[in-house]
Image (cartoon, rainbow, N blue to C red):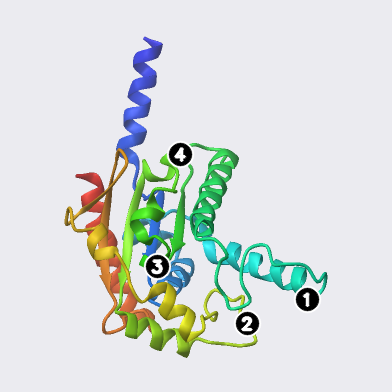
């Protein structure tokens, strides 16, 4: 009797689920990902839940702050202590390509901490995981292999699509030399952007299915946010498109 009751409770909770647990937000640098997150943060709890299928509590796992911390550490190691940089070159590249994958291992670890610290297994929260990958350092195919099963077992993907030329234009536009650490105002040198992100493997990675990505044993629903012309420059343009796409994604997720 007790076992039966527990099963019924679990079934009811599964049916009641109305939000994405893990939204993986990917795309080229300056494609509009940060603007989407900023919009989600500013959206009321009711609209976030009813229209975007995202929780009242939002956790952001972005690998950029982790990456930037390594660059800051290397600056001190080189210029203050006179030692050899640990993670990166002074030109803005990682010393070893595996470090791109190490970032996603760290993201996965942070995800585990959030889940463990959550008081309620069915808390009204969503975790947004944001990153960009170019073919030069393994692309999305390799990157997804380094996300944990815990993330991928209940994940959906929103890919923000822009050509390299648009990424370059917006990367230059948002550059603020006084805030290189800022999520919304950081930018890459043109040469670094070209080397790392001009080539992208998204089309190849997603070519197997129009609705699902396949990583290890996981089948992950996805949609593409075509951001040409740009819809992320104003909330009036962004809101209806994001609403439409996340509702499409919700339908695929529940199929």
Which residue bears the numbered disc 4?
122
Q: Left or right of 122: which side holds 109?
A: right
Q: Which residue is mark 2?
A: 179
Q: Which circle, 1 or 4, is nearer the viewer?
A: 1
Q: Quadrant of the N terminus?
A: top left
Asked if the residues shown at circle 1 and circle 4 are in contact, with their CB atoms under 8 angstroms apart, the answer is no
- Packing grade of label 1 (10 A; few <14, some 14-19, many >=20) is few
**Tag 3 residue:** 136
Which residue occupies the foreground of this view, 212 or 117?
A: 212
Residues at badges 3 and 4 in contact (C-beta under 8 Å)? no
Residue at point 29%, 77% (across, down): 227
Q: Nearer the viewer, residue 97 or 18?
A: 97
Above-or-below relation of 90 to 106? below
Question: Which residue is labeled 1 in the image?
Answer: 79
Query: Mark 1 or 3 closer to N-term?
Result: 1
Find residue 214 and report its horizontal and vertical position in percent.
26, 47
Is label 1 in a helix, a strand or a loop?
helix
Q: Secondary structure at mark 4?
A: loop
For marks 2 and 1, give the CA distance: 20 Å
From mark 1 to mark 3, how far is it between C-alphas?
A: 29 Å
């Amino acid at each position: 009797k007790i076992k039966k009751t527990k099963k019924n409770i679990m079934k009811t909770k599964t049916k009641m689920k109305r939000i994405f647990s893990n939204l993986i937000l990917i795309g080229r640098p300056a494609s509009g990902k940060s603007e989407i997150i900023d919009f989600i943060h500013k959206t009321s709890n009711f609209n976030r839940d009813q229209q975007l299928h995202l929780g009242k509590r939002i956790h952001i796992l972005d690998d950029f702050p982790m990456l930037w911390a390594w660059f800051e550490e290397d600056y001190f190691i080189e210029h203050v202590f006179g030692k050899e940089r640990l993670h990166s070159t002074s030109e803005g590249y990682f010393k070893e390509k595996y470090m791109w994958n190490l970032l996603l291992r760290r993201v996965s670890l942070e995800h585990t901490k959030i889940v463990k610290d959550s008081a309620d297994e069915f808390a009204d929260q969503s975790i947004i995981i944001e990153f960009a990958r170019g073919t030069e350092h393994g692309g999305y195919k390799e990157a997804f292999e380094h996300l944990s099963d815990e993330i991928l077992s209940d994940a959906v993907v929103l890919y923000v699509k822009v050509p390299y030329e648009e990424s370059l234009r917006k990367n230059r536009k948002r550059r603020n030399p006084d805030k290189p650490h800022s999520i919304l105002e950081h930018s890459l040198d043109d040469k670094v952007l070209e080397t790392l992100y001009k080539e992208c493997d998204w089309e190849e990675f997603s070519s197997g299915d129009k609705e699902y990505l396949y990583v290890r044993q996981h089948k992950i629903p996805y949609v593409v946010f075509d951001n040409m012309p740009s819809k992320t420059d104003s909330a009036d343009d962004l809101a209806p498109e994001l609403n439409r796409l996340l509702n499409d994604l919700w339908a695929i997720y529940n199929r």
